[in-house]
């Protein structure tokens, strides 16, 4: 049984999440996908994780998702393949992109950042406030901008030392 979990009464999960230990999920979090949240993770107020019942979001632990971030695990493709919108019958709909979003350990998403389907935040990645991530990243990198690009690398030694002290 998971321990030390706080989920605000105004957080909404359309599909029951799989939760680790030491998790805080704040007011206004809204999630429509299959979600796994690892140990020592904080999801700040008004984070949206969307993509429907076939979408998937995985947080492997020691992650932070800051206020107002948007994680999109599934979306219409918005091309010439058909009509788009939630109410369009299946036979008339255009193509969709449904790909998991993965946060490896120690990765973080800044305030009001947007993460698109299929994105992977590798170990230790920091996506800065207001940035737009489309795709894969390099471990221990800081990503900034629209689209987000690598602006510097982080030395993981102290983080890994503190992790070892906490978990052993």
Image (cartoon, rainbow, N blue to C red):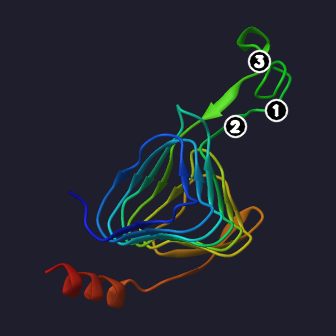
Rendering coords of residue 24 (x, y %): 44, 70
Q: Are marks 2 and 1 in contact (CB under 8 Å)?
A: yes
Q: Are marks 1 and 3 in contact (CB under 8 Å)?
A: no
Rendering coords of residue 166 (x, y %): 22, 84
Asked if residue 148 is positioned above or below residue 79 in the image, the reply reads: below
Q: Which one is closest to the eye, mark 1 or mark 3?
A: 3
Rendering coords of residue 16 (x, y %): 42, 43
The C terminus lies in quadrant: bottom left
Taking the image as shown, residue 15 lies to the left or right of residue 23, namely right
Mark 1: few/some/many CA within 10 Å (<14, 14-19, 20+)? some
Taking the image as shown, residue 49 lies to the left or right of residue 167, namely right
Q: Earlier in the sequence, mark 1 or mark 3?
A: 1
Secondary structure state at the residue bearing disc 2 = strand
- What is the C-alpha distance between the residues marked 1 and 3? 10 Å
Secondary structure state at the residue bearing disc 1 = loop
Q: Nearer the viewer, residue 56 or 105?
A: 56
- What is the C-alpha distance between the residues marked 3 and 2? 12 Å
Q: Quadrant of residue 104?
A: bottom left
At x 20% / y 57%, what residue is drawn?
Answer: 1
Residue with the mark numbered 1? 78
In this view, the residue farthest toward the left is 168
Residue with the mark numbered 2? 75
Residue with the mark numbered 3? 93
Rendering coords of residue 147 (x, y %): 75, 61
């Amino acid at each position: 049984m998971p321990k030390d979990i706080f989920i605000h009464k105004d957080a909404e999960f359309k599909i029951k999440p799989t939760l680790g230990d030491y998790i805080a999920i704040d007011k206004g979090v809204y999630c429509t996908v299959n979600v796994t949240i690892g140990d020592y993770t904080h999801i700040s107020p008004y984070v949206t994780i969307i993509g429907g019942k076939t979408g998937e979001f995985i947080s492997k632990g020691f992650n932070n998702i800051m206020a107002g971030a948007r994680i999109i695990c599934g979306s219409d493709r918005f091309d010439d393949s058909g009509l788009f919108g939630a109410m369009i019958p299946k036979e008339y709909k255009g193509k969709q992109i449904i790909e998991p979003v993965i946060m490896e350990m120690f990765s973080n998403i800044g305030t009001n950042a947007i993460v698109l389907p299929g994105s992977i935040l590798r170990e230790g990645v920091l996506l800065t406030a207001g940035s737009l991530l489309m795709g894969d990243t390099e471990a221990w990198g800081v990503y900034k901008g629209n689209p987000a690009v690598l602006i510097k690398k982080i030395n993981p030694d102290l983080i890994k030392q503190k992790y070892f002290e906490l978990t052993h």
